[in-house]
Image (cartoon, rainbow, N blue to C red):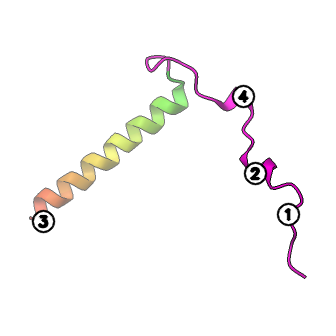
Amino acid sequence: MPHQITNASSVEEIPASNHTTNAPDEKTESQEEADRLYEEHIEEEYSKREGGA
């Protein structure tokens, strides 16, 4: 028997505490870490492409 979703709206609900209302310069440590890792990854990808071209 397939699973039935009885309250589909609960999937879309996000608690207000998770909304990003901080100014751009008020990043949390986890956001800063994620940004740093993303930047490193992008730089690695660009260097791979430049070296392979």
Dot 1 or dot 3: first in sequence order is 1
Spatial CA span between label 4 and label 2: 14 Å
**Crowd around label 4: few <14 · some 14–19 · many ≥20 (10 Å):** few
Residue where numbered disc 1 is placed:
5
21 or 6: nearer the viewer: 6
10 or 37: nearer the viewer: 10
Spatial CA span between label 1 and label 4: 24 Å
Dot 4 or dot 2: first in sequence order is 2
Seen in the picture, residue 49 relative to 14 is either above or below; the reply is: below
Dot 3 or dot 2: first in sequence order is 2
Residue type, mark 4 in image:
Ala
Spatial CA span between label 4 and label 3: 46 Å
Identify which residue is drawn at 26% across, 55% down: 45
Dot 1 or dot 2: first in sequence order is 1
Residue where numbered disc 4 is placed:
16
Percent of width and height locating residue 31: 50, 32
SS type, badge 3? helix
Residue where numbered disc 2 is placed:
11
Identify which residue is drawn at 87% across, 69% down: 4
Percent of width and height locating residue 19: 63, 29
Residue type, mark 1 in image:
Ile
**Is label 1 in contact with label 2 (beta carbons under 8 Å)?**
yes
Report which quarter residue 3 is drawn in.
bottom right
Q: How many marks?
A: 4
Q: Can residue 21 be found in the magenta stretch?
A: yes
Q: Is residue 39 left or right of residue 23?
A: left
Residue type, mark 3 in image:
Gly
Residue where numbered disc 3 is placed:
52
